Image (cartoon, rainbow, N blue to C red):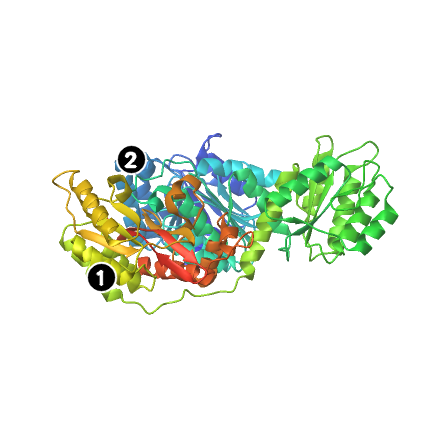
Amino acid sequence: MASTLSTLLSPRAIAVVGASRRPGTVGYQIVDNLVRHGFQGPVYPVNPSARSVHSLPAWRSVREIPGEVDLAVVVVPKQHVLQVVDDCGSRGIPSVVVISAGFREVGEEGARLEAALMDRIRAHGMRLVGPNCMGVLNTAPEVAMNATFAPTMPPAGPVSFLSQSGALGVTILDYAAEYGIGIRNFVSVGNKPDVSGNDLLEHWEVDPETSVVLMYLETFGNPRRFTRIARRVARKKPIVVVKSGRTAAGARAASSHTGALAGTDVAVDALLAQCGVMRADTVEELFDLAMAFGTLPVPDGNRVAIVTNAGGPGIIIADACESKGLEVAQFEPETLERLEEIFPEEASVRNPVDMIATATADSYRLALNLVLSDPNVDAAIAAFVPPLGVRQEDVAQAIVAAARSHPRIPVLAVLMGRDGLPQGRSELRSAGVPAYIFPESAARALAAMHRYGTWLQRPVQAPTVFPVESGRVRSLLATAREEGRQRLHEDEAYQVLAAYGIPVVDHRLVRSADEAVAAAESLGYPVVLKVVSPHIVHKTEFGGVRLDIRDESDLRENFTDMVDACRSQGPEIELRGVLVAPFVRGGQELILGMSTDPTFGPLLMFGLGGIYVETFQDVAFRVPPVTGQEAKEMVRSIRSFPLLEGVRGGEGVDLDAISGAVQRLSQLVQEHPEIGEIDVNPFLATSRGALALDARIRLGD
C-alpha cells in the first residue's frame, strides 16, 4: 500500500476545500502556507462565496477545477465533509486530507459519521489522512508543500515525522526549527481510520530521502502488523517513538501474578525493544535522540571519551553515561602521555579529560583528535563552559574539525550557559554535530544510539518451531469449556506444559489417604501435598499445601487435616483430589507467565519467582513470537540475573533450559490463543535443568 501514498505526500496539484479569505482561520492559513512556502504545483482554493483567495482564482466546487488534482485538503464543517468527499471522488482526486474535527473523537454520533466517511473513501478508491488532523508537509525542493495550519516551515532534512496529535504538531514543527532538525515529511494522522502509522512506515522504508523516522503515538491500531513492519524498517533506518499513556490506569484486575505485573505500557516497552525501536519518554527527549540519529554514525561500542574545560560537567557526563549503560573509556598509555605533553599539570588527562578553564579552541581540537584516535574509544562527548576570553564559535569550529577528521566515530557536544551559546550550538548542528544544553541529554542520546547499534548487531532469527502435542492441548481446553470452567485443574495445567516440552515435576493425582501413601512410596519421600479444586486458586490461603512430608504417618495426618480444612470453607467447595509430588530442595525459584493484553494480545513474563514475585517485581516481558536470541536476552535482563550465573562460588543454573522453556511457552500461547493467563510459579531452575513445580492456566473470556 506504500506506493498509494505518493499523491498524498508528493502531490502535483492541491485543492483546498474550505479556503478562506479571513486571516486567523484554518482555511486561510493552509492556503497561505502553500503559497508562502513555494508549493511547486498549482493551488486551487475552493470557496463558493469568493472569487479569489490569496490572489488565486477561487472555485465553487472541486468539480469545476479544470486541471488534474492529486490532493484535496478539506477544511469544511463536519456535516459537509461527506459531500465534499463524494465530489472529490467523482472528480478522480486520489488523496484527501480531512482537517475537520467532530468525528470519532467526540462520541458515538461522530463515530457513525466517520464510518460513513470511510464508506465513501473506500467506494471511491481514495486514501485518507484524518479526520481531526493538522495536515501534511513535504520539504523536498521539488514539492515544497506545507499543507498544514502550523505557522512554521521546518528546515529540509532526512527526518520524517508522524504525529497522532494535531495540537502537538504545531509544537513539534516549532521544536524542529529551533533544534535545526531537518524534516522530510510531517504527517498528522488524526483519527487514522485509513492511513496509519504502519502505512507511513512502509512508505518511508522505501523513501531514499528519509533516514530517520520519528513517531508520536497515542494508540496502536494494529500492533502485530506494526511489529512485523518495524522489525524490517529498523534494520534500514532508526525509528524513535514517543508513546503517551505511561501512567494510564491500565492495570487490569487479574488473579495471576503475570496479570498483576503486566500492563499496557509494559507491552509497549517490550514490543518496541524487540523491534529495535527506540522509545523516548518526552517530546524533548525525542528531539534529543533525533539530533543524534539524524547526523551521526551508530557507535561500534559503548566506550565514551569525555573532553571538557571544567571538572563538574565532566563528572556529570561520566555519571550519566554509566547510569545508561555506557562505559567511560580507558585510554591507551600513549594517549595519556601525549595529553600530558599538551596540557598543564593542573589538568586531568584521565577520562574525563579536564583541560581546565584556560583551555582554548585549539585545546579542544588537539584533545579530541587524540582521544578519537585511541582504539579504546567508540564515541566522544565534548563539553564547554564559557570562560572569559574564549569565543564559543571558535570552540564549535574546533569540535567540528575534530569530528570531521574521524567521521566513523560519533561526536556530541554540550555547550552550557546562555550568553552567546545559541550561535555555537547552531554552528555545530549545521555541521552535523548534535549540540545539547545539558550533559544528561547528550548521554541519553548516545545511550540510545548504542542500544540501537547493539540491536542491529543481533543475528536475524526466526522463532524455533518445536515438535509438540498440540492436539492434546486442544482436547484439554475443550474439556474445560464444555464443563463451564474458565480454569484448568492443576494436573491439566501440568499436561498442557508437558505437551509443549516444558518439564513439570513428577506427580500423582489421588483421592484418598491410601492412594496418597502409595503415590509417596512410588515417588519417594519427602513429598508435597496440594489440594486440587476449581474453587481454590491460592491454595496456601486455605491451608491447601503441605510441604516436606517425610513418612506415612505424617502424610496421613496432613492429608486428612488438609482435606478437612478445605471442606470446612463451605459446602460449595468441590475437591477434585490431591496432588502428591516430590519435595524438591535447592535451586532458584523463577516464574514463567503469560497474560493477555486487550490491544497487544499475549504478553510473556519471566523473572524471579516464589512468594516474593510481586514484592520485588524483578521480571521482564516480551511479545511473542520470541526467538532464541530474544529469550536469552529476556533471561539476562532481570536485575537478579547474577544469581542465575552463580555468586560467591555458588552453582549457576541451566540457562539454556530456561530460555528453551520461554520459547516453548511463546509457541504455546501463539498456537492456542484461547488461553488467557498462565502462571508457572515456582519454575525451579538448577544446574541440571528446570522444572515447573506449580502451574495455573486460565482461559480467555
Instruction: Give the secondary structure at mark 1.
Output: helix
In-front residue for pair 458/530? 530
Q: Which amino acid, by three-letter code, is at mark 2?
A: Gly
Specify whether 368 is left or right of 115: right
In-front residue for pair 310/241? 310
Query: What's the distance in space between the residues labelled 2 and 1, CA to CA?
Result: 40 Å
Specify whether 177 is left or right of 331: left
Quadrant location of the N terminus?
A: bottom left
212 versus 131 height, above or below: below
Residue 383 quadrant? top right
Residue 71 tag number: none
Instruction: Give the secondary structure at mark 2.
Output: loop
Q: Is there CB contact under 8 Å for labels 2 and 1? A: no
Q: Earlier in the sequence, mark 2 or mark 1?
A: 2
Residue 474 tag number: 1
Specify whether 306 is left or right of 114: right
- The residue to which callout 2 is attached is 107
Number of marks in picture: 2
Q: Dot 2, how many residues are within 10 Å of its Cα: few (below 14), some (14-19), or many (20+)?
A: few
Q: Dot 1, how many residues are within 10 Å of its Cα: few (below 14), some (14-19), or many (20+)?
A: some
Residue 389 makes an appearance in the image: yes
Q: Residue at x 67, y 42 (%)?
A: 318
Residue 535 makes an appearance in the image: no
Q: Position of residue 243 (x, y in %)?
A: 45, 43
In-front residue for pair 224/665? 665
Q: Position of residue 424 (x, y in %)?
A: 73, 39
Q: Residue at x 49, y 48 (%)?
A: 640
